[in-house]
Each structure stands twice: as structure tokens, then as C-alpha cells.
Amino acid sequence: MKDNKVFVITGATGVGKTTIARYLQENYRMPRVITHTTRRPREREVNGIAYYFETDDSFENNHYLERVTYAGAKYGSSYEGLDRAWQKSQYITIVLDTAGAITYAQELGSRAIIIFVTVTSPSVLVDRVQVRGDDPHAVKQRVASPEFLRDMKLPQNLKGRAYELVNDDWSKTKTRLDLLVTDIMHGRRLPKKQLE
Ligand SMILES: Nc1ncnc2c1ncn2[C@@H]1O[C@H](COP(=O)(O)OP(=O)(O)OP(=O)(O)O)[C@@H](O)[C@H]1O
Ligand SMILES: Nc1nc2c(ncn2[C@@H]2O[C@H](COP(=O)(O)O)[C@@H](O)[C@H]2O)c(=O)[nH]1
């Protein structure tokens, strides 16, 4: 049986999780697990690509490995979504909040490679999501949520378990990702610390 792995990319809003998942998809052909949410689509977000957008009722029709509430909306990753992605590739990605990342670490053990993404100066995050085109009202609500503040810091349960990646400079981030992915694909273990 193939040694399936999922790269779990976690951290606060705007740190660059989705950008990292896209990079791994484009450069390493890693499919991203599409998760489910009840929040409204942002401009340019397409159903079945960004998320499966659900109503409160339809959200309940899936079988979730984990589910959370984040800034007032429901989010969940289904067993089916994970298996669909693993059918396409041994290495896949998923973008989760830190509560979801903790569950993945507990449930999947060494099959889950956890990457905790941060930035040195949190003030850049609002600028980044505004540049992305998020609705200013939604941004205000998001940065006031307890989940946003929580996800700025590596949770205790992930200390010594997650790779920490500072995404201030995109070209450095790509180099760090390339080194990590190559090591994982060759079965080499890096010590769990900040990726340099
Ligand atoms: N290193 C970087 N420097 C500057 N801008 C960046 C960098 N990395 C990502 N960005 C930009 O920041 C914005 C937010 O990135 P992204 O959507 O990947 O964040 P996210 O962590 O997935 O956010 P969310 O959790 O809200 O979906 C995007 O416009 C992206 O292009
Ligand atoms: N635990 C889970 N977290 C998820 C899932 N899908 C997305 N997310 C995370 O939620 C926040 C908010 O996302 P946004 O797209 O509204 O900005 C972010 O941290 C995502 O990574 C999921 O299925 N489970």
C-alpha cells in the first residue's frame, strides 16, 4: 500500500495558506482536499473549487473527519474528500484552521505533515486580504473573531509536531517548501522546527 501523506496547511487568515496549497498543486501535482462551508462565497470563489458551499441543512449530509465553527460559519472536511484526493495522488494538501490541524495530527498520525504558517508582523494580514478583494465588513468581522486571534499562535498541542513557516517573503517561502517536500518525498525526517 502506498504511504499516503497529507500536507496540512494551517495558520491565521491571510498568512498565505491557500497560496501555498496552490504552489504545491502547480509544482508537485498535489491535489487539495476541497472542504465544505456554510459561509458565503467571496467574489471569484467557485463552488467545488474553492469550497463546496453548503446551506445549514446540506452541510449535515456529509461524513466529516472533523468540523468546526470559524467566525460564525461552519467548516468541515469529509472522509470522502480525503479519499478522492488520495486516489489521485499519494501526496495531497488541505487548508485548515488550527483546531482542524490538531484533529488531523491526532487522527492521522504520521500521515499528516503539519505546516503552521505565520508572518512576522500581523498588521500585514489585513492589507493582504484587502488586496485579495475581501469585503471590508467581512474582514472587520473576521479579525475580531476569537478564532483569528487563536490561530496567530502555534497551539500547544502542535508544538514539536508542526513545521513552522514564516511567510514574509514569497521567494523564501518557495525555497523552504521545496526543501521540506523533497525531504518528505525521500523519506527524510527534518527536525520539527522553523523551516529555514
Ligand atoms: N509572502 C507573501 N507576501 C505578500 N502577499 C502574499 C504572500 N503570500 C500570500 N500573499 C497574498 O496574501 C493574500 C492572502 O493569501 P491566502 O489567500 O493564501 O491566505 P489564507 O491564509 O489562505 O487566508 P484565508 O484563511 O483567509 O483563506 C493573497 O492575496 C496572496 O496572494
Ligand atoms: N477545521 C477546518 N478548517 C477549515 C476547513 N475549511 C477551511 N478551514 C479554515 O477556516 C478558516 C476560514 O476560512 P476562509 O476561507 O473563510 O477564510 C481558515 O483558517 C481555513 O483554513 C475545514 O474543513 N475544517
Image (tube, grey):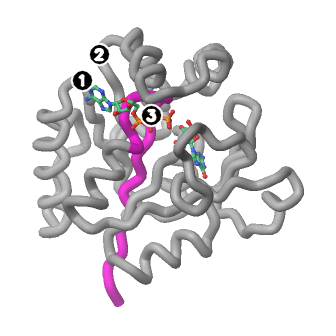
In the rendered image, residue 85, in percent from the top left (x then y), is placed at 45, 73
Q: Amino acid at mark 3?
A: Gly
Q: Is residue 69 left or right of residue 182?
A: right
Q: Nearer the viewer, mark 3 or mark 1?
A: 1
Q: Residue shown at 39%/36% (left/top)? A: 159
Quarter of the image containing the C terminus? top left
User: Number of numbered discs present?
Assistant: 3
Badge 1: few (under 14), some or many (20 or more) residues near its Cα, within 10 Å?
A: some
| Stretch of the chain drawn in magenta | 1-18
Q: Residue shown at 69%/49% (left/top)? A: 37
Q: Residue shown at 60%/23% (left/top)? A: 135
Q: Amino acid at mark 2?
A: Thr
Alpha-carbon span between mark 3 and mark 1 = 13 Å
Q: Which residue is mark 1?
A: 168
Residue 76 visible at all: yes
Residue 11 is labelled as 3
Alpha-carbon span between mark 2 and mark 3 = 13 Å
Q: Residue shown at 19%/57% (left/top)? A: 181
Q: Is residue 172 above or below residue 162?
A: above
**Dot 3: what SS?**
strand
Mark sitting earlier along the chain (2/3) = 3
**Dot 2: what SS?**
loop
Q: Which residue is mark 2?
A: 120
* Name of the residue lying farthest toward the right: 57
Determine whether label 2 and label 1 are within 8 Å by CB: yes
The picture quadrant where one finds residue 92 is: bottom left
Q: Is mark 1 within 8 Å of ligand 1?
A: yes
Quarter of the image containing the N terminus? bottom left
